Amino acid sequence: MSEGEVDELWSQFVAVRAEVRSDDLSPKGESLRNKLIEHYLPLVKVTAERLYAKLPNQVDLDELKQAGVFGLMDAIMGFDPARGVKFEAYGKQRIHGAILDELRHMDFAPRLVRTHAQQLKSAQRELELELGHPPTPKEVADRLGLTLDEYDEWIRQTSMATMGSLDSVTNEGDSEGNKQLTRADSLEDRRHASPLTMLEKKELVALATKGLSRKEKLIVILYYLEELTMKEIGIVLELSESRVCQIHHRIVAQLQKQLDTLRGDLLAD
């Protein structure tokens, strides 16, 4: 399918999609969506196989691809061509996220995230010793053989992940105290909607961005609320992708410092 044909397909699909208020498409809409799915299926294959290469042998590649297809469908339903960004960049992010959600359900993602965290920490420590100063995201990404998008995804995962052992026993149990649960038993199931509403998310972002510059606030909002990639944010703000990554890294470090200070104050009280 030529680029012009793909653009025309998107135009028709967006028009049909605008006629409904939910994901319940008309037969014509479903037909157009299926054509888009078929066109972008190679994105699912590449993303799933790339993750599969880093996972234990017992993981089923077909299950990863199936999860990726659901991510692709969500991406197609949520993509707005008027933003002026390529679907491939947006779609790849949603596919990757859907596969990770499936892995969390399978209890492999937490192990993979811990491995990524260790690799990031080692690379940062080694580079700081070699360079004599804290390494930039680009330098760490190069050391690990990652693109900046992949590096940023690792940072996001390790920042949000709970690093406690999945095999350790929690204090949760039944009223008689007869049942012991491991952390793996209480992992969040990301396949279902979070009780956190968009309003609450906005309130949290407002709190987290207090004291940040306008540009820094925009990066936080576009990344965590709008779920744009670093490349897409760079296009919006007319900055290079590496510059957006650097600013984001600085924001995360600043927020972590604020949280550490708050934690210390609370413990002191």
Image (cartoon, grey):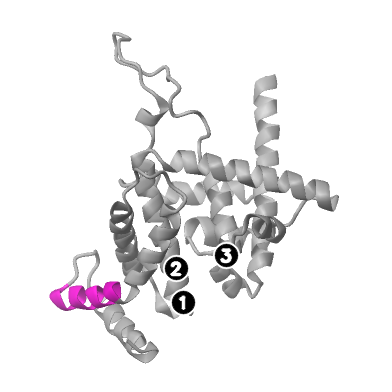
Q: Residue furthest front?
A: 57
Asked whether disc 1 touches disc 2, contact meaning CB atoms under 8 Å apart, the reply is yes
Residue placed under numbered mark 1 in the picture = 86
The residue tagged with tag 1: helix, strand or loop? loop
For the residues marked 1 and 2, what is the alpha-carbon distance in whole angstroms? Answer: 7 Å
The rendered magenta stretch, by its main secondary structure, is classed as helix
Residue placed under numbered mark 3 in the picture = 230
In the image, what residue type sits under mark 2? Tyr
Mark on residue 90?
Answer: 2
Whether residue 54 appears in magenta in the rendering, the answer is no
Closer-to-camera residue (213/13) = 13
Residue visible at 45% across and 22% down?
Answer: 168
> What span is colored magenta in the figure?
26-38
Pointer 2: residues within 10 angstroms few (<14), some, or many (20+)?
Answer: many
The answer to whether 119 appears left or right of 179 in the picture is right
The residue tagged with tag 2: helix, strand or loop? helix
Asked whether disc 3 touches disc 1, contact meaning CB atoms under 8 Å apart, the reply is no
Q: Residue furthest top?
A: 176
Q: Position of residue 266 (x, y in %)?
A: 65, 25
Q: Position of residue 135 (x, y in %)?
A: 76, 53
Q: Residue furthest right?
A: 132
